[in-house]
Image (spheres, rainbow, N blue to C red):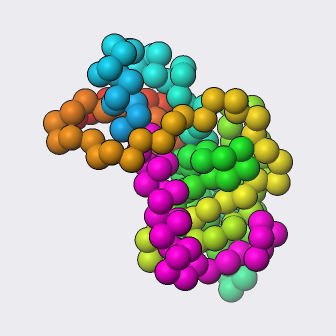
Amino acid sequence: MGILGTVSFGALGRLLLVICLSAALSLTAVFEARAEGCGLSATEIYRDKSAAVVEVLSLSINPFLVIDRTLPRSGTGFLVAPDLIVTNYHVVADAADIAVFSDEGSHRAILVGADPTLDIALLGLIDQISEPNLPEIALSPVAVGAPVFAVGYPMGVGKSISAGI
């Protein structure tokens, strides 16, 4: 199925989804390389790379309850193409509606594929995000003890950057 329906991934699909997730999660490695190699500050990294980090909100409905039927969830997503986002499956599991918030505004999304075992999901945007500057993908691992920066939406607080080792 294409972007209009949910697909369950087989072995090849899981490999592709793992590659997409690895690419998205390697954003911290890209931030590390930029910080070390170019001497960029956290502010510069946030300004240059955070456009590819989006907030994902979903709403699930439990038909068996009368009170508290809706379950809102939120999490971080990573733009891997102008119309594709990788996020955690638990953020969009059983979602009746999915919204993505980027620096450009809000966008509707649909679940394209998911692997609940690996807790990853691929979302397709109804409209594309016109971010001209997707970060390059670094598939090299981050060395233990290396300084890294992570951009995300922790606990629904808003987009932020944190530094660590």
Give the residue at x 47% y 16%: 44
- Whether residue 123 is visible: yes
Q: In this view, does 32 lie above or below 40?
A: below
- Image quadrant in which you'd find residue 43: top left
Q: Where is residue 23 in the image (x, y as percent from the top left)?
A: 47, 50
Q: Nearer the viewer, residue 45 or 132?
A: 132
- In the picture, which quadrant includes the C terminus? top left
Q: Is residue 153 magenta?
A: no
The quarter of the rendered structure image containing the N terminus is bottom right
In the rendering, at what x and y percent does residue 15 appear?
48, 70
Give the vertical position of 134 relative to 15 (above or below): above
In magenta stretch: residue 5: yes
Give the image location of residue 54, x and y in percent.
61, 42
**Residue drawn at the location 49% of the way across and 48% of the way down:** 24
Residue 33 % position (x, y): 34, 29
Range of residues picked out in magenta: 1-27
**Residue at the left extreme of this rendering:** 145
The one nearer the camera, 142 or 105, is: 142
* Residue depicted at x 51% and y 36%: 136
Vertically, is 83 above or below 34? Answer: below
- Asked if residue 69 lies left or right of residue 49, the reply is right
Residue at 55%, 82% (x, y): give it: 10
Q: Is residue 68 visible?
A: no
